[in-house]
Amino acid sequence: GKSKLWDLMKSHDSVAIIIHHIERRSLLFVRQFRPAVYFNRVYAGGEQEVPPVGTAIDGDPRLGLTVELCAGIVDKEKPLAEIAAEEVQEECGFNVSASDLERVSTFRTGVGTTGSMQTIFYAKVTEAMRLSKGGGNPAEGEYIETVEVPISQLYDFILDESIPKPTGCAFGVSWFLKEKLRPSFVE
Amino acid sequence: GKSKLWDLMKSHDSVAIIIHHIERRSLLFVRQFRPAVYFNRVYAGGEQEVPPVGTAIDGDPRLGLTVELCAGIVDKEKPLAEIAAEEVQEECGFNVSASDLERVSTFRTGVGTTGSMQTIFYAKVTEAMRLSKGGGNPAEGEYIETVEVPISQLYDFILDESIPKPTGCAFGVSWFLKEKLRPSFVE
């Protein structure tokens, strides 16, 4: 063999939840500011020189907004479904029970840099389960807004390039459209 | 406002291609060793102490194998479709023209760490377009194997957790199943 040196980051595994609002016939997502996306968009194309570490960055903060599945990192010794249920409550304000979550699958994110694991769940919610308006945990510096997309607009939403979103969000929507609206697939 | 310090990595944007082999009724993917995934799986769960930078890692290298869409980083001043066409040839051995690629959409990958952009394309190939068996660029230390999945097995493939794969691969497959096999979606 040949020895190789590789740059990588250790990063937390995560959970993400496809939240289906039954009565409103919609999926719920979260909009938040992502420093890495902001940085990447401000310095995209190499037109601006990248500043030294610690420099404040001036620019339109809206460039850093993404729309994603409700998600959270796995930083506790708890079953993944419990962490997922907590995130649904914290970010979107709905009381779901871990045992009501359906596990979709697990993927690798950032295969070139972090290689961490993301497990995706599916949750159904109704207005009776609403505890708060959500919004994340301000103590952790989270400012999160819930975004609702009607089922009829989901496919246009995932292909709309003006709304920055991760591939996991696009997959979650596609899975929902296939699995929950189309009962079976035969070639 | 409040000033915040954030750890992030500058990372290249990328292209990925859903390769549809028309005659064989299959999609083509690439299997490769991913150091970050390997590292993450060997040190998952924090049971082993993470070694200092530069340490050689002993373990089963198969833990680092992923199955992904054919993909490449954007490190040249060229249209994305041209870079994508080059990757199809280099990794999978098919001669496709940039103008024959269909652009699917653009997503953000690694929203928590790199915020880079991934543009996904769709390509149709036939045996007449085959130039080589692919395998990546050995000069760049790439050792890539082509993996073929018949259309009838695609959905099971994306949900099979024993095969580590990125969410982008799962989305690409879902998009293909919906867009190329089901002509329209009406709620």
Image (tube, coloured by chain):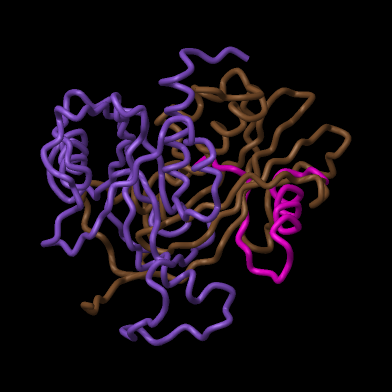
Chain colours: A brown, B purple
Quarter of the figure with the N terminus of chain A:
bottom left
Q: Is residue A55 above or below residue B177?
A: below
Q: Which residues are magenta?
A: A66-95
Q: Is residue B40 above or below residue A44?
A: below
Q: Is residue A33 left or right of residue B100?
A: right
At 36% across and 27% down in the image, what residue appears? B25
Q: Of residues B33 and A130, which is closer to you in this image? A: B33
- Which corner quadrant of the image does residue A5 belong to? bottom left
The x and y percentages for residue A7 are 31, 71
- Is residue A42 magenta-colored? no
Q: Is A45 placed left or right of A8 in the picture?
A: left
Residue A45, x across and y down, in percent: 22, 46
Q: Is residue A96 visible?
A: yes
Specify whether residue A47 is in view. no
Q: Residue at x 40, y 65 (%)?
A: B64
State the image coordinates of residue A44 (x, y, percent, origin top left). 27, 47
Magenta stretch containing residue A87, yes or no?
yes
The quarter holding residue A160 reads: top left
| Residue at 24% across, 50% down | B73
Left or right position of B39 against A142: left
**Horizontal and vertical percent for residue A93?**
77, 44
Q: Residue at x 43, y 43 (%)?
A: B168
From the viewer's side, name the closer residue of A149 and B179: B179
Is residue A112 found left or right of A185 in the rendered image?
A: left
